Amino acid sequence: MSFKDLKKQSKLGSLTAKLVKEVEKMNNNGASGDERTWKLDVDKSGNGYAVIRFLPAPENEDLPFVKLYSHAFQGPGGWYIENSLTSLGQKDPVSEYNTQLWNNGTDAGKETARKQKRKLTYMSNIYVVKDPTNPENEGKVFLFKYGKKIYDKLTAAMQPEFEDEEAIDPFDFWQGANFKLKAKNVAGYRNYDSSEFAAVTPLLDDDDALEGLWKKQYSLAEIVAADQFKSYEDLKKRLEYVLGSKRPAQDPDVYEEDNDRGSAEELVTAAVSAPSATSTVDKEEDDALSYFAKLAEE
């Protein structure tokens, strides 16, 4: 798509419908220290404020965001912090191991599976309009990692709930809107409920400048390219190392003969060779996508 085509589709309003359709399809199918990545700074109270603009899909790419699943938990052998192969629609040893934990019928197994469940984040290109804490970031393009709360605000902008609200494409240069990112501490957790979109307005009045920004955007497809993930075998080895000799709590009525034997490697092997039918824990992991499931039904 050329820059002229991008602007033409903006005027026709066709990008919003395409985005909604592609996002629904994606969801139905189920960078720390990186100088490219912008992060909102907060004060000692956990409050922070900035104004950003979500940018269109990079040149030669279809969507203005990608989703990424990851796991982060600690075991006897250390920390397991890895991206999940489920981001690529592939089998992942941790998800399979969590399925075994959940299905063993014990509260302890379910609790461990919850602690180890995958986390869903999104990545987009943004333009920093205002960053009071770090004004040197203003006027620059960055990658921005965000979670379900902000993602829901993006989707709500594209498909508002009430008739008196006009749908917008928050990723559009001309028909989009700046996003006032507001963070506060609520019960010990970072909260973005007060964040909101400003009025619809072009990001800049100069198309040449906009095209320059567009060409400065970072590839999102590269973030979720297969070569950015470790192999199934390497992830399984890391999982075995992190688990050490620790074994999942087991229902004695089911696993009584295994109480005195079995290494972490054997447990993981059993888990990943078990049937991979969707379990309750898989459903919990996908709660972050329930918003679009609701939209698809309407």
Image: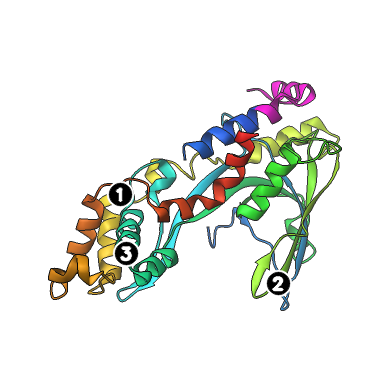
* Mark 1 residue crowding within 10 angstroms, few (<14) / some (14–19) / many (20+): few
Tell me the tag on residue 25: none
Q: CA distance from mark 3 to mark 2?
A: 36 Å
Q: Which residue is mark 2?
A: 185
Query: Label 3, on which residue?
Result: 105
Please tell me whether mark 2 or mark 1 is closer to you in this view: 2
Which comes before the other along the chain, label 3 or label 2?
A: 3
Residue 18 locus on image (x, y percent): 64, 27
> Would you say residue 13 sits in the magenta stretch?
yes
The amino acid at mark 2 is Asn
Which label number is shown at residue 231?
1
Crowd rating for badge 2 (residues with CA inside 10 Å; few <14, some 14–19, many 20+): some
Picture residue at 33% right of the left edge, 68% below the top: 106
Count the numbered circles shown: 3
Q: Residue at x 50, y 37 (%)?
A: 28
Q: Which quadrant would the N terminus be assigned to in this image?
A: top right
> Which percent across, then down, holds residue 12?
77, 21
Residue 277 place in picture, x, y as percent: 33, 45
| Front residue of 67 and 143 | 67
| Closer-to-camera residue (117/175) | 117
Q: Dot 1: what SS?
A: loop
Count residues near mark 3 (Cα–Cα under 10 Å), then give few for <14, some for 14-19, many for 20+. some
Amino acid, disc 1: Ser
